[in-house]
Amino acid sequence: MSVADTAKTGAFRIGPFHLSRRITLGRYTGVLLGLVAICVYLAVTEPVFLTWENWQNIFRSQAVVFTLAVGMTFVVLTGGIDLSIASATAGCAMVLGIAIQHGADWWLASLAGIALGFAFGFANGFMIGVAKIPFFVVTLGTLSIYQSIALLLTSGETVSLFTYPRFNTVQTIINGNTGPFPTVLLIGAGLYVVAAFVLRYTAFGRAIYATGSNAEAARLTGIKVTVVLIAVYTISGLTAGLGAVVQTGRLTAARTQVDPNLMLTVIAAVLIGGTAFTGGDGGLLGTVIGVLFLGVIQNGLQLSSVWTFWQGTVSGLILILAVGLGVLRDHGWRIRLRVGGRGRSKAPGALAVPVVPDANPHTPKGGEE
């Protein structure tokens, strides 16, 4: 049986388990229980925690993290990591600030920052997808390059935008409310809807999951893996540009120095949310939960007057725990597959790889949004 025949018959399955999307919150159980437990504890010990003003602060403080985490989710689903996303955000913010200083309107300056993010992401994707350089080497190198670009643009000086009326619109949007809701929360919800739709209902989204599950098998089924890799890193760059607009609006300034915890927090949010670091499994719903989980912890540490320097330690420990639990879950899943597959003969020429062709309208390994 050829690969094409296998695709038509849907023989890409192991034992009795069809590797198709299953609507389940199983991978989110741990983080959801942890989130509920922390919320209950903070509600009892810190009465201000449950106030709407405090939750608005949580949403605003996590707006940049969530924006970047959306792009990072696309990358991690293919089995990669974008280590340069925080540095790219700093570079985009500097271009936005310089454009405002030189008389550009807020929308044009914002587009300039987003366009630079697109260019940064495309450069990463080209080197990874076309030149076949490992993603770790590329993004580690561009982490330093993009940070240097941010420093060189203004000789390391912060660009203050407080005195520029042209920037007031961005500041008002990012820090303001639409009705009772923070505007950044509504913007984030719109970003989530668009990104989740792409992952769940488009051929491109299915190709992302297939690439992360098994890139070679995806290539054999006709998926252009190189194009997928270029696209996901470009999306990551776009979210870096959007994150720069949000960050600059919150600070009313463009900073050259990258928050040393930003990249760790973004990656932690994605992995804590259940997206497998090996690719092919996960989704944006988990990323939302992961961002909220880290935001609540950070807020709780602040309300409890815990020394700020401990926040990085807590985030790092949670990241290790989340990935460790994911490995244990995957190990248990493989054991069930082996047990369920005993005594079953494979079709001649069938490939036992976790990739589902176009006959499956969803993702290969059960990703959810």
Image (cartoon, rainbow, N blue to C red):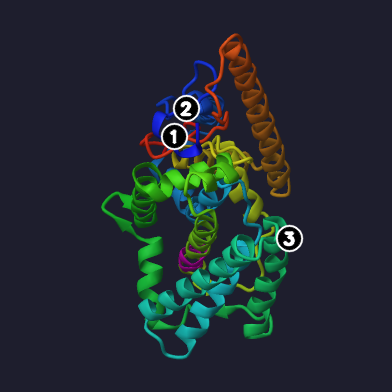
Q: Which residue is mark 1?
A: 5
Q: Position of residue 366 (x, y in %)?
A: 47, 31
- The residues bearing labels 3 and 2 have C-alpha atoms spaced at a distance of 36 Å
**Which circle, 3 or 2, is nearer the viewer?**
2
Type of residue at label 2? Ala
**Which circle, 2 or 1, is nearer the viewer?**
1
Tag 2 near tag 1, CB within 8 Å: yes
Q: Which residue is mark 2?
A: 11
Type of residue at label 1? Asp
Residue 318 magenta: no
- The residues bearing labels 3 and 1 have C-alpha atoms spaced at a distance of 38 Å
Q: Secondary structure at mark 3?
A: helix
Q: Nearer the viewer, residue 333 or 356?
A: 356
Q: Earlier in the sequence, mark 3 or mark 2?
A: 2
- The residues bearing labels 2 and 1 have C-alpha atoms spaced at a distance of 9 Å
Q: Residues within 10 Å of mark 1 (few under 14, many from 20)?
A: few
Q: Quick check: can you spot residue 303?
A: no
Chain part drawn in magenta? 240-247
Q: Earlier in the sequence, mark 2 or mark 1?
A: 1
Q: Secondary structure at mark 2?
A: loop
**Which circle, 3 or 1, is nearer the viewer?**
1
Q: Earlier in the sequence, mark 3 or mark 1?
A: 1
Q: Residue at x 51, y 75 (%)?
A: 116
**Residue 287 vertical position relative to residue 60 in the rendered view, above or below:** above
Type of residue at label 3? Val
Q: Secondary structure at mark 1?
A: helix
